[in-house]
Image (spheres, grey):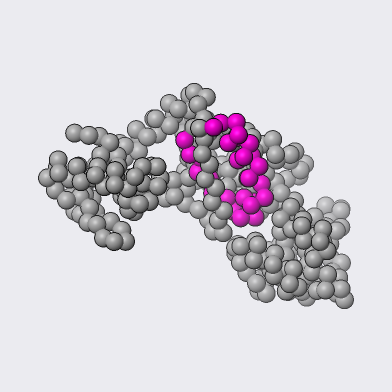
Amino acid sequence: MNWDDFDVFCRVVEHGGFTAAARFMQRPTSSLSASVARLEAQLGTRLLERTTRRVRLTETGEMLYGDVARPFAQLREVALEAVARGNTVHGTLRIAAPYEFGAHHLAEPACRIMQQYAALKVEIDVEHAKVDMFARHYDLVFSATDHGLPSSSVVARRVFTLERGVFAAPALVRRDMPATPDDLRRLPLLAGLEDDEWSFTDGAGGTQVIRTDAPRMRSGNADVRLQAAIAGLGVIRVTATFCDQAIRAGRLVRLLPGYRCAPLKIFAQFPQRRLMPAKVRIFLDTLDAFAGPEPADA
C-alpha cells in the first residue's frame, strides 16, 4: 500500500480537483490522477466521480476521507514543524494580503528573501475580500483593520501601522474646502466595504467621528476608490503611501491637515503551530525591517 496515494487523494478532495491539487503540490496532474486510480484499484472501489469541471466523492470516498484526512493533516503538521526546527528556507511561501497593503509593502521584502534563499519560491495574492487561510492553504494572510482582530484559530501579530488621511481632487474642494471632519458630511464620500465610520483626532486629543452610511461609492478595491477620487467624484480615506504618486502629481490634495485619521493596522495571521516554519519566520523578520517604528498611540 502506497501511503502517498492516500495523501494525494486527500489533497484532491481538499482542493476540489486534480488541477488545483497538482498546482498546490507542484506535481503533474497525470501523477495525481495515477495515484488516485492506483488507490481505487487497490481498494477495489471508486472513490471519486470525475467530471470535466470538478470531482465529487462517492459514498465510499466520503467515508475514507473522513477516516484519513485528520491523520494525514497531523502528519503534515509534524513535517512542517520538523523543517521549522532547522534553518532551511525552501519550498513555496504562499501569502495573501489586501491590495492597499500588498501592492506597496510586500514586493521589496519578498524580493529580498528570494535573493537570499535561492530554493524559496513566493506566491503573493492581493485580495479585495477577506481570505480563508485554511480553505486556500496560505502560509501567511495579512488583514487590515481599524481595531484589533477577533479571536480565532490562527495566530495574529501586528506588523505595520500605516498612516491614513483624507484626500480629494483639487476641483472638488476648490470652493468648499472642509475645515473640520464634520464638514465632510456635505461632500460625497468614497468608502471601503467595511467602512461604517471615519474617526479623527485633533491636536488637543479630541475625537470626532463621521458616519459613512451612504457614500457616493463603496468598494473593497482601494485602487477603484483612488481612481474615483482622482476623477473628482468624492473624498477618499486611504493610506498616504497608496496615493503618494497622485499627491505629487497634483491630482489629489490632502484635507484636514490639523486632524489625524485612525491608522490602518496590518496583522499577519498564520496557523497555530508549536514552531513557526523557517520561511514564515524569515519573511516576517525581513518585513519588520521595512515597517519602521510604531506610532506612540497606535
Give residue 221's position: percent from left, percent from top.
61, 62
Quadrant housing residue 11: top left
Q: Main secondary structure of the magenta part?
A: helix
Give residue 6's position: percent from left, percent from top.
25, 40
- Tell me if 24 is positioned left or right of 58 in this view: right
Give residue 269's position: percent from left, percent from top.
54, 43
Q: Which corner quadrant holds the N terminus?
A: top left
- Tell me if 64 is positioned left or right of 234 in this view: left
Please tell me which residue is depicted at 60% across the width and 31% down the height of the picture: 116
Quadrant housing residue 80: top left
Residue 173 sits above or below residue 295 on the image:
below
Whether 147 is among the magenta residues is no
Please tell me which residue is depicted at 47% across the width and 30% down the height of the picture: 274
Q: How many marks?
A: 0
Q: Find the magenta span and give its range.
A: 91-118
Whether 93 is among the magenta residues is yes
Question: Which one is nearer the viewer's eye here, 256 or 20?
Answer: 20
Please tell me which residue is depicted at 57% across the width and 50% down the height of the picture: 97
**Could you tell me if residue 206 is visible in this image?**
no
Residue at the far top: name it: 86
